[in-house]
Structures are given as C-alpha cells and as structure tokens.
C-alpha cells in the first residue's frame, strides 16, 4: 500500500512540474499525450504494487492468432 501511495505522489509531482511548463508554451497536444501516458503508467504500476494480476499483451495476441494458426495447420495436413 505504501508503494502505491509513493507511485501516486511521484505522478502528482511530475504533473506539477511539467504541466505548467507545457501550458506556458500552449502545447495542448503534448499535454494530452503526456497525461494519457502518465495515467496509463501510473495505473499499471499501482496495480503491480498492489499485486493485482495484469495480463500480458502477449495473451491477447495468442488468443487472436491461435485459431488462425490452427486453421493454417489444418490446411497443410
């Protein structure tokens, strides 16, 4: 739990450091991308810190391509 709070505090510190600089430059695209990536990273790291099972992207790829592979293999038999 302490690690999750530390991750959240570090994320807030990053926002407080970088967002005002980007607002001063009026760089809204960078602010949006920065916010989305920081949010994704924070959520994933908090999940890891709280020992929540986060599936690998490889699981999705395997789920999609296994039937395709099986079909191609059945064609070659």
Image: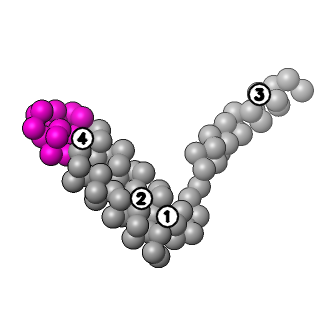
Residue 25 pos. (x, y %): 12, 33
* Mark 1 in CB contact with mark 2 (< 8 angstroms): yes
Left or right side of 73 for 56: left
Residue visible at 85% across and 23% down in the picture: 76
* Mark 2 vs 3, N-terminal side: 2
* Mark 3 vs 1, N-terminal side: 1
Question: Could you give the CA–CA distance between mark 3 and mark 4, rounded to whole angstroms?
Answer: 42 Å
* Mark 3 vs 4, N-terminal side: 4
Question: Could you give the CA–CA distance between mark 2 and mark 4, rounded to whole angstroms?
Answer: 16 Å
Q: Which mark is residue 32?
A: 4
Residue 38 lies, with reference to residue 77, above or below; the image says below
Question: Could you give the CA–CA distance between mark 2 and mark 3, rounded to whole angstroms?
Answer: 38 Å
Q: Secondary structure at mark 4?
A: helix
Task: Find disc 3 in the rendering and name its residue.
Answer: 72
Task: Find disc 2 in the rendering and name its residue.
Answer: 43
Judge whether residue 20 can be spotted in this image: yes
Residue visible at 28% across and 57% down in the picture: 13
* Residue 74 on the magenta segment: no
Crowding around mark 4 (Cα neighbors within 10 Å: few <14, some 14 to 19, many 20+) is few
Question: Nearer the observer, disc 3 or disc 1?
Answer: 1
* Mark 2 in CB contact with mark 4 (< 8 angstroms): no
Crowding around mark 2 (Cα neighbors within 10 Å: few <14, some 14 to 19, many 20+) is some
Task: Find disc 1 in the rendering and name its residue.
Answer: 47
Q: Residue furthest bottom?
A: 1
Residue visible at 12% across and 40% down in the picture: 23
The residue nearer to you, when weighing 71 against 66, is 66
Give, as a single range, the part of the protein colored magenta: 19-31
Q: Secondary structure at mark 1?
A: helix
Q: Secondary structure at mark 2?
A: helix
Residue 59 pos. (x, y %): 64, 48
């Amino acid at each position: 739990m302490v690690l999750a709070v530390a991750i959240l505090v570090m994320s807030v510190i990053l926002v407080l450091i970088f967002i005002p600089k980007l607002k001063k430059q009026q760089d809204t695209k960078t602010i949006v991308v920065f916010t989305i990536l920081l949010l994704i990273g924070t959520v994933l790291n908090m999940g890891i810190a709280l020992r929540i099972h986060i599936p690998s992207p490889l699981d999705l790829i395997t789920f999609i391509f296994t039937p395709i592979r099986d079909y191609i293999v059945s064609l070659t038999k």
